[in-house]
Image (cartoon, rainbow, N blue to C red):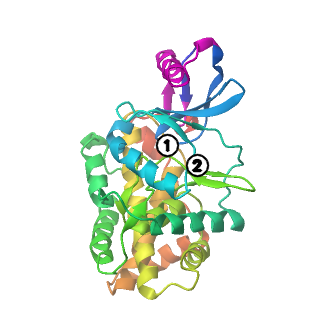
Amino acid sequence: MQDIQTTGGLFTAEDRKAVLGNICNVFDCEESDVEDLEPVQTGLTNVVLSFRLNGGKYVYRHPGLGSEILVERGRETIMQKIVEDAGIDTTLIAMDVDEGWRIGRFIEHVDFDYNSLNDMVRAVMLFRRLHKAPCHVRWNFDVIKKAEGIKAQIDPDKYGHFPLFEEIRDRVYQLAELAKTDGIRKCNIHGDARDENFLINKEEIYLIDWEYGGYGDPGFDIGSYVCGGEHKLADVDRILFTYYRRKPTEKQKRHFYAYIAITGFFYMHWTMLKISKGQAVGALKEQWYHFAKNYSLLALPMYGVEVDPAAYEAAKEAAVHCTMQDLSFMNDEIEAFKEGKE
């Protein structure tokens, strides 16, 4: 078998041997019983594989490049129990806390569609159920501290190459403090609630992969969802209306705008970590940069903070149309993969 480059990292012949060993230990089978073990091009933190065994189909998650920095596996096991009890994710078969692999039931599904109103409503209703579920974990997912932890793992020469990085950082740090005054209750959060982590079909919807789950601000889940797609300003307001089942108050609206910016900034760090390790991220970095840059300018005036009027108008125009900047230069600048290989 040749090494395979997946969206979550490189899958090697050595990895395949370890994966087969884990599958056989769980199911008490022989390697020859495992059929069609192949990568699924989905997810960015891990290598995701599917396989067939004794007439059933399953999904195997193999830790990807840099996941040991990004993920708290022990917390994941606690969150998995919480969401299983709440009916949010009942797909788990087995997982290993130390090594980070997971086996789950394969759910026949279609790709989650950010442009589908039906998919959006079902996803946001799942957020509501998660955020209202009883909390049994007090591990606080502080988005800014998590970003700083990722920064510590990045080569300083490969940090901060986004345009206007310092200005965006200063706005985001200010918003993180201001958002604490909004009175939004912390709760269970998923922490990576993007399209790739929803399994959806006509009858069911699950939110899977609880590696980032914990006790945190619900704005990070809404922020992850928004930053995962090319959402226009009207889309964002529709998502918030659906979440609250009414028009949000001004405090609620500014809080979630702030967290869209904070979330984009967090994922900018994820981008820099991956690229610094030689794995290109692709067009998602443009999305994450867009939401950090432009929503930080939109949110600050909602807290009474003045920003440059011309910059504000440009940010509003970009948000209305979800206009992205071309950041393809970044990969060449820090000697990662060229954009064409992503």
Q: Amino acid at mark 2?
A: Glu
Give whichever of 189, 288 is nearer the camera. Answer: 189
Q: How many marks?
A: 2
What range is drawn magenta here? Answer: 6-32
Give whichever of 317, 37 is nearer the camera. Answer: 37
The residue sitting at 34% across, 43% down in the picture is 74
Q: Is residue 252 magenta?
A: no
The residue sitting at 43% across, 56% down in the picture is 191
- N-term-proximal mark, 1 vs 2: 2
Question: Left or right: 201 with respect to 275?
Answer: right
Q: Amino acid at mark 1?
A: Val
Q: Quadrant of the N terminus?
A: top right
Q: Is residue 52 visible?
A: yes
The residue sitting at 55% across, 60% down in the picture is 324
Query: Is the residue marked by circle 2 packed among few (<14), some (14-19), or many (20+) residues within 10 Å?
Result: some
The residue sitting at 41% across, 51% down in the picture is 79
What SS does tag 1 mark?
Answer: loop
Determine which residue is flagged by label 2.
196
What SS does tag 2 mark?
Answer: helix
**Cα gap from disc 1 to disc 2, whole angstroms:** 15 Å
Seen in the picture, residue 314 relative to 9 is either above or below; the reply is below
Q: In the rendering, at what x and y percent does residue 236 appear?
A: 56, 72
* Mark carried by residue 312: none
Question: Left or right: 139 with respect to 5?
Answer: left
Question: Left or right: 328 with respect to 40?
Answer: left
Give whichever of 259, 191 is nearer the camera. Answer: 191
Determine which residue is flagged by label 1.
281
Q: In the rendering, at what x and y percent does residue 7 appear?
A: 54, 37
Main SS class of the magenta portion in the image: helix
Q: In the rendering, at what x and y percent does residue 68 appear?
A: 34, 37
Give whichever of 328, 2 is nearer the camera. Answer: 2
Q: Is residue 231 visible?
A: no
